[in-house]
Image (tube, rainbow, N blue to C red):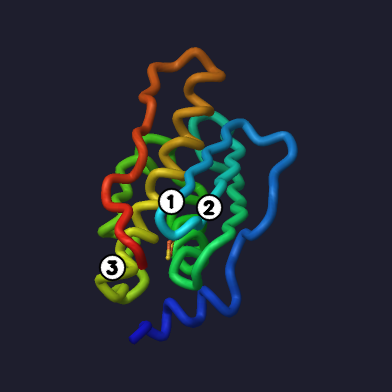
Amino acid sequence: MYSEKVIEHFRNPRNVGVIEDADGVGEVGNPVCGDMMTFYVKVKDGIITDIKFKTFGCGAAIAVSSMISELVKGKNVDEALSISSKAVVEALGGLPSNKIHCSNLGAVALARAINDYKRRNGLPYENIPEPEDVEEG
Ligand code: FES
């Protein structure tokens, strides 16, 4: 059911934790499954120098958070924003269809963290809406 990559990231998640003096924080919850995800980013000269996450949720949500943290570390904030939930699913070697909403949760939490950084720094930013598909996983 799960790819080896998903299982590996779930068992050994990267970048778990909190950044107390984060430059941006993004939080999202799924009201259907009750899972919650928070990303913290440190940004220097527009580059994500550090990222951590706290995920209270299913194994797929943890694997998604871990993969996102690896994909965006060292990237420019706008490059990081352009990483779609589909790209995260591909990087994980796929997710079962009833777990796709877990990847949307990750994309929204990351986008909110980056937009929080932009807002704090007087840069143009967007309010990221709730994830659209909240079907039960
Ligand atoms: Fe809700 Fe995975 S995030 S079941």
Q: What residue sits right under mark 1 in the picture?
A: 30
Amino acid at dot 2 = Met
User: Which label belongs to residue 36?
Assistant: 2
Q: Nearer the viewer, residue 65 or 137?
A: 137
Residue 127 lies in quadrant: top left
Please name the residue shown 48% across and 47% down the image: 29
* Amino acid bearing label 3: Glu
C-alpha span from label 2 to label 1: 7 Å
Q: Secondary structure at mark 1?
A: loop
Secondary element under disc 2, as helix, strand or loop, is strand
Q: Is residue 80 left or right of residue 24?
A: left
Q: Earlier in the sequence, mark 1 or mark 3?
A: 1
Query: Is the CB–ligand 1 distance for label 1 below 8 Å?
Result: yes
Estimate the x, y position of residue 50 in percent, counting from the top left: 61, 46
- Position of 23 relative to 98 (above/below): above
Q: Position of residue 72 (x, y in %)?
A: 45, 50
x 44%, y 63%: residue: 64
In the image, residue 88 above or below residue 2? above
Marks 3/2: CA distance? 22 Å
Q: Is residue 106 above or below residue 99?
A: above
Residue at image position (52%, 63%) is 66
Tell which circle, 3 or 2, labels the residue nearer the N-terminal end: 2
Q: Is mark 2 within 8 Å of ligand 1?
A: no
Which of the two discs, 1 and 3, sits closer to the camera? 1
Element under label 3? helix
- Name the kind of residue labelled 1 in the image: Asn
Residue 90 is marked as 3
Mark nearest the camera among 3 and 2 is 2
Regarding ligand 1, which quadrant of the image does it lie in? bottom left
Crowd around label 3: few <14 · some 14–19 · many ≥20 (10 Å): few
CB contact under 8 Å: marks 2 and 1: yes
